[in-house]
Image (tube, rainbow, N blue to C red):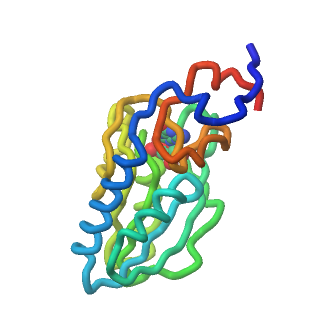
Amino acid sequence: MSVHPSMHIIEDIQEVLISEEQIGSKVAELGAQISKEYEGKDLLLVCILKGALVFMSDLMRCISIPVSIDTMAVTSYGASTVSSGVVKIIKDLDVPIEGRHVLIVEDIVDTGLTLSYLVSTLKNRKPASVKVCTLLDKPDRRQASIVPDYNGFVIPDKFVVGYGLDYMEKYRNLPFVGVPKDYVWNEEH
Ligand code: 5GP
């Protein structure tokens, strides 16, 4: 079945899982916690593109201590629906991280394979520390033993979009996190 794309992306959403207001107050909380725990330290925030773009831009404005930022883009090898655990770096950091405190900012941890690869790759570069801050944690499907040091919300095993997260590059600009309607999976893109 193919359905014409909706004029407004909000029409494709079945359920708002986390509202804009809930995200706003949680991000402020995380920012305050990070500001306190990294006070006096040389902190580098590493945004994992593209999913963490929106989260990163809000989070960094809730951090009151000096920070630097950088970005990385990664992709999984293999079939798109099954995480193979083999991650390819498409865009690496621009700066060396030796001796610095690195905080990876990621949209969601699902199997944990992407983050466990990223953490071990960055640890090899001899930073002072590497920690992880995720907006969402989907623990049901975990394969690698990754526990985010900072996390916004634990969610059930549902595919979510919005606030940076996409389905086929769509829905990143929704201001909340939601579950798409079933017909979205059958749309022609
Ligand atoms: P992991 O390696 O932890 O299985 O996968 C993490 C990546 O899978 C995330 O960065 C994200 O790109 C994608 N992902 C996992 N769950 C979801 C989801 O519910 N919605 C979206 N849009 N992407 C997801």
Would you say residue 84 is visible in this rendering? no
Image: 130 above or below 126: above
Give percent across and percent down for residue 20: 42, 47
Picture quadrant where residue 98 is located = bottom left
Q: Position of residue 185 (x, y in %)?
A: 64, 24
Most foreground residue, 176 or 107: 176
Q: Residue at (36%, 69%) from the top-left corner?
A: 62
Q: Is residue 45 visible?
A: yes
Q: Quadrant of the N terminus?
A: top right
Q: Is residue 115 left or right of residue 13?
A: left
As drawn, 19 above or below 131:
above
**Residue under the image location 45 percent in, 75 percent down:** 125
Relative to 26, say whether 183 is above or below. above
Give the farthest residue toward the top. Answer: 1
Q: Quadrant of the C terminus?
A: top right
From the viewer's perspective, tell me whether residue 116 is left or right of residue 89.
left
| Residue 84 picture location, percent across and down | 54, 40
Q: Is 121 above or below relative to 6?
A: below
The residue shown at (35%, 36%) is: 155
Residue 88: x, y in percent?
61, 55
For residue 79, side relative to residue 161 (left or right): right
Residue under the image location 76 percent in, 18 percent down: 2
Q: Nearer the viewer, residue 125 or 111?
A: 111
Kindly indicate the quadrant of the structure image that contains residue 25. Answer: bottom left
